[in-house]
């Protein structure tokens, strides 16, 4: 069975994207086509805030891309050395994440996270509300331009201070239409098509072409 995965490939030292590996175990052939393109912004502002842990009550990461923005702020050897000096201060606070992929990237930064099994921002917000109170300093939330308002709204309604900072903008991948056309020309209609984010559905040429949910 051929499966089309509309997501960015995620390769690791252990081999190809885990979805490719898992589907192959069951005899399925999968193809990955990136749907989204990302542009990082406000990294100077983010960098300044990363080195002021005393002004924040903790960190929140709901996407791997937000963690990548942090990594970009630490690329120089001097910045990495400074980070080694302050990351323990962050570890004395709470570092919240959604998903195992995000948790793994946060761990690479030398940070200890919680909430990786929450699965969604909605569930994570409940965990934060259980653990934090109005008296804490603002939680720093690096996020994308298309973030959902579920988490900020829930925290605000419960009086938990939050400082959001847009660190990447999301748009349609420039080669999406070309790649989709090539796939359908070469392989035909797949047995299944999987989307991995609301943004992926929004920008997908499949939706614009009239494909409906049964094909997804």
Image: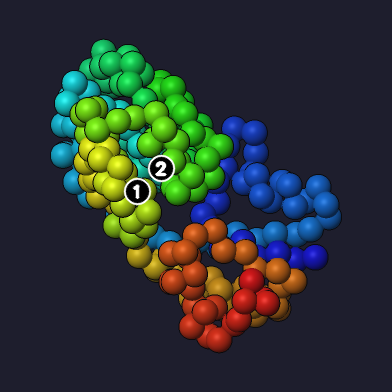
Judge whether residue 136 can be spotted in this image. yes
User: Which residue is drawn at the image coordinates 56% and 74% (left, top)?
Assistant: 180
**Drawn side of residue 188 relative to residue 9, left or right:** right
Of residue 104 and residue 138, the one placed in the foreground of this image is: 138
User: Which residue is drawn at the image coordinates 29% and 57% (left, top)?
Assistant: 145
Residue 86 image position (x, y, % from top left): 26, 17
Q: Quadrant of the N terminus?
A: bottom right
Q: Quadrant of the C terminus?
A: bottom right
Q: Which residue is mark 2?
A: 125
Q: Residues within 10 Å of mark 2 (few under 14, many from 20)?
A: many
**Compared with residue 178, is residue 148 higher up or lower down, i.e. above or below?**
above
Task: Name the quadrant containing residue 183.
Answer: bottom right
Q: Which residue is mark 1?
A: 154
Of residue 30 and residue 195, the one placed in the foreground of this image is: 195
Judge whether residue 51 can be spotted in this image. no
- SS for callout 2: helix
Instruction: Tally the marks.
Output: 2
Of residue 130 and residue 168, the one placed in the foreground of this image is: 130
User: Which residue is drawn at the image coordinates 26% and 13% (left, top)?
Assistant: 85
How many angstroms separate mark 1 from mark 2 (CA)?
6 Å
- SS for callout 1: helix
Residue 5 image position (x, y, % from top left): 61, 61
Do the residues bearing badges 1 and 2 touch, measured as CB atoms within 8 Å?
Answer: yes
């Amino acid at each position: 069975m051929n499966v089309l995965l509309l997501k960015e490939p995620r390769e690791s030292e252990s081999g190809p994207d885990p979805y490719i590996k898992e589907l192959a175990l069951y005899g399925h052939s999968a193809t990955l086509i990136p749907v989204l393109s990302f542009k990082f912004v406000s990294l100077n502002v983010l960098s300044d805030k990363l080195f002021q842990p005393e002004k924040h009550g903790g960190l929140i990461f709901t996407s791997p891309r937000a963690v990548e923005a942090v990594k970009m702020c630490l690329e120089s050897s001097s910045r990495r050395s400074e980070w080694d000096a302050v990351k323990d201060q962050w570890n004395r606070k709470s570092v919240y994440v959604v998903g195992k992929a995000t948790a793994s990237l946060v761990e690479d930064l030398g940070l200890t996270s919680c909430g990786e099994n929450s699965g969604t921002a909605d569930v994570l917000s409940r965990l934060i509300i259980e653990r934090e109170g109005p008296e804490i300093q603002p939680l720093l939330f690096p996020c994308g331009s298309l973030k959902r308002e579920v988490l900020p709204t829930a925290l605000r309604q419960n009086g938990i201070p939050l400082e959001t900072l847009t660190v990447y903008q999301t748009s349609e991948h420039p080669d999406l239409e070309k790649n989709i056309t090539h796939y359908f020309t070469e392989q035909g209609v797949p047995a299944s098509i999987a989307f991995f984010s609301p943004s992926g559905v929004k920008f997908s040429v499949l939706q614009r072409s009239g494909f409906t949910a049964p094909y997804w």
